[in-house]
Amino acid sequence: MTAVLVGGVPAPAAGPASVGGPASVGGAAPPTVRPGDPQYADLVRGVNQRWVGRPGQVVVATSTADVVQAVQQAARSGRRLSVRSGGHCFENFVSDPAVEVLVDLSGLDQIGFDPTRRAFVVGVGARLEEVNRRLFTGWGVALPAGSCPSVGVGGHIAGGGYGPLSRLFGLTVDHLYAVEVVVADRSGLARAVVTTRDADDPHRELWWGHTGGGGGNFGVVTRYWFRSPGVASPAPRRLLPRAPAELLVSTVIWPWAAMDRAAFTRLLLNYSRCTPRATGRVWWRTTSTAI
């Protein structure tokens, strides 16, 4: 899920226009799926099949312009709107019967290098598997994002973006240079704004709000740009952390019957002390299963 706020907070008064997206609504209506259409049943469910939404329409966005139009229509009509990139929200924030308009962002899956901003650009509909593959094969770089291949980057990064390389390279948002957000003001006027971490950016606080503030707070994110801070090189392959050649994944399972208070405390303490500096290697938490 990506962040969304419709109404209540003024949009930035003036700022850089989005690249590839308008500052206000215009153009043809975005593709829309309604109850009765063959795609509807699939689009109103996420990974957690427990939750089933009943929106009056699902806007299948293919551009920032589509998102701007959907947000403005929802804001001015007073309908509750939610958004989805990869569908891995396990709560009912998206597939909720109270949601009246759902914006599906899976089509915003651009991955590439933006020479103008000297940063890697990733659309919020891109899945982690494809992001990792494209960054590695194209430039030999990596983001410290999650390991589940089908997770969409939209909500994952808005919440911080933690993964196997985070102990070495920090959170994904530590490398976030810019974000494109569709915002709506009190009058229902929607537009796209690109905000960066540059100190002189007039909307820098909006960028800062997406460095771990989570989904559901500021607007509908449509694109992210990534460049590690403090890097002056013009070469793209030096603008993000160098990807490791390989990653060893190991899962350890403890029977619940053997996990008393003392053993559990010892496990947590040993894990917290196992740092890259202490071992000379990079360790990351895998999933522990109790049986």
Image (cartoon, grey):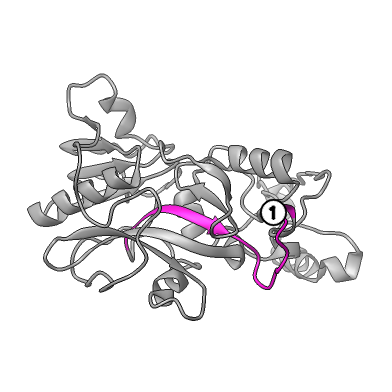
Q: Which residue is mark 1?
A: 236
The answer to whether residue 97 is seen in the rendering is: no
Residue at far right of view: 280
**Quadrant of the image occupied by residue 235:** bottom right
From the top left corner, tell me how far across and down residue 16 is, in percent.
Answer: 37, 65
From the top left corner, tell me how far across and down residue 272 is, in percent.
Answer: 75, 69
Residue drawn at (47%, 60%) of the image: 158
The answer to whether residue 115 is seen in the rendering is: yes
Judge whether 222 appears above or below 66 on screen: below
Q: Nearer the viewer, residue 228 or 52?
A: 228
Judge whether 213 appears above or below 86 on screen: below
Q: Nearer the viewer, residue 168 or 252?
A: 168
Q: Nearer the viewer, residue 191 or 147?
A: 191
Judge whether 220 appears above or below 268 on screen: above
Is residue 216 found left or right of 124 in the rendered image?
Answer: left
Is residue 109 found left or right of 10 in the rendered image?
Answer: right
Quarter holding the C terminus is top right
From the top left corner, tell me how far across and down residue 90 is, in percent.
Answer: 42, 46
Residue drawn at (70%, 40%) of the image: 138
* Mark 1 residue type: Pro
**Quadrant of the image occupied by residue 63:** top left
Judge whether 52 appears above or below 1 on screen: above
**Quadrant of the image occupied by residue 57:** top left
**How many tags in the picture?**
1
User: For residue 16: magenta?
Assistant: no
Residue at far left of view: 77
Neighbourhood count class around disc 1 (C-alpha, 10 Å): few under 14, some 14–19, many 20 upward: some
The local secondary structure at tag 1 comes to helix
Is residue 245 found left or right of 174 in the rendered image?
Answer: right
Range shown magenta: 219-237
Residue drawn at (65%, 47%) of the image: 290
